[in-house]
């Protein structure tokens, strides 16, 4: 009986491994160099709605994996909903590792990474399988900050192609944007935890409220009790969750992060379907 159960478990594991799609590496021309990206694409000829997904300061991949589990999980979720997903590798393309603790970064969210977004969009506009009027942006942390720069009215592309359909920013650093009078030309959704101890929820509120005053279509959702990286299933414990109760899903911030994660998945699906 035990052998039979073991064999069944192994068969299920093999089936799950087969079901997980492998991304295709693509090369996107830049003004100087090449932007490497990972592409998840539904079967068929399309045209498919497409999401450009922007990694955080830790980079896109690691330890031989071209796409870290957190981004792969989102890519597979979006893929199941019928979207193609393009994940540009802003750091690996420039032979850089994670940039989270680098004081003087050479790849800026507002400069090189915005150029990567423009290059990715230009490349997608030339692909027959892309629904050109349904290309959206999603970003996490540093990638979300990049997104905020990319959707500013002054960064609109000068070609005749359709603009981005929508944009979704997970816990961006809004402090600079709030101080600069940020606005957006694209419907933009900001998702952040109220207890985010890396980004600043008050700055994000101020930024979005200011954009409303400039007639921009922007929305913010602040999840009570949730922390930074709340949408990542393996988020490490924060110091605020030091009690023994925090280890149980229904207690501490793990529970609030799980609730925020589930709610954010619905928000993303609804925002992309607009």
Image (cartoon, rainbow, N blue to C red):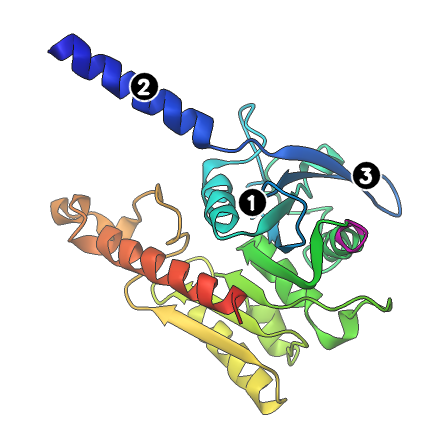
Residue 96 in view in this figure: no
Residue 101 found in image quarter:
top right
- The quarter of the displayed image where residue 264 is located: bottom left
Question: Residue 49's spot in the image, x, y percent?
Answer: 62, 57
**Which residue is situated farthest in the front direction here?**
44
Q: Nearer the viewer, mark 1 or mark 3?
A: 3
Seen from the viewer's position, the closer of residues 204 and 220 is: 220
| Whole-number angstrom distance, CA of label 2 to CA of label 3 | 40 Å
Q: Where residue 149 appears, x then y in whole percent? A: 68, 66
Compare residues 240 and 212 and report the one nearer the observer: 212
- According to the picture, the residue beneath numbered tag 1 turns out to be 100
Asked which secondary structure carries label 1, the reply is loop
The residue closer to the viewer here, 104 or 164, is: 164
- Quadrant location, the N terminus: top left
Please check the rendered image and state whether residue 124 is part of the magenta-colored stretch, yes or no: yes
Q: Main secondary structure of the magenta part?
A: helix
> Mark 3 highlights which residue?
34
Query: Magenta region: which residues?
Result: 123-127
Residue that numbered label 2 is attached to: 11
Q: Residue, x 68% and y 66% (percent of image)? A: 164
Q: Residue at x 61, y 77 (%)?
A: 179
Measured as percent of width and height from the top left, residue 259 is found at 27, 59
Please state the horizontal and vertical placement of residue 248, each as a whole percent of the image: 15, 46
**In this rendering, is residue 48 above or below 182?**
above
Which mark is nearer the camera, 2 or 3?
2
């Amino acid at each position: 009986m035990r052998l039979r159960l073991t064999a069944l478990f192994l068969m299920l594991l093999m089936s799950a491994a087969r079901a997980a799609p492998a991304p295709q590496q693509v090369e996107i021309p830049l003004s100087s160099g090449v932007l490497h990206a990972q592409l998840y694409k539904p079967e068929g000829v399309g045209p498919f709605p497409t999401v450009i997904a922007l990694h955080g300061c830790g980079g896109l991949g690691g330890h031989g994996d071209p796409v870290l589990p957190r981004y792969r999980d989102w890519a597979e979720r979006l893929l199941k909903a019928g979207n193609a997903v393009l994940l540009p590798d802003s750091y690996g393309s420039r032979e850089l590792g994670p940039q989270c603790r680098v004081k003087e970064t050479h790849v800026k969210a507002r400069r090189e990474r915005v150029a990567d977004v423009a290059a990715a969009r230009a490349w997608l506009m030339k692909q027959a399988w892309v629904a050109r009027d349904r290309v959206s942006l999603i970003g996490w942390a540093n990638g979300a900050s990049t997104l905020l720069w990319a959707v500013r009215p002054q960064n609109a592309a000068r070609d005749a192609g359709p603009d981005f359909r929508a944009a979704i920013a997970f816990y961006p650093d809004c402090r600079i944007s709030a101080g600069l009078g940020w606005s957006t030309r694209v419907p933009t959704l900001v998702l952040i935890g109220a207890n985010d101890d890396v980004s600043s929820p008050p700055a994000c509120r101020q930024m979005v409220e200011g954009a409303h005053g400039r007639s921009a279509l922007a929305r913010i959702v602040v999840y009570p009790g949730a922390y930074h990286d709340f949408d990542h299933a393996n988020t490490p414990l924060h110091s605020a969750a030091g009690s023994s109760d925090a280890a149980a899903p229904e207690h501490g911030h793990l529970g609030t992060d799980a609730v925020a994660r589930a709610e954010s998945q619905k928000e993303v699906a609804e925002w992309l379907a607009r």
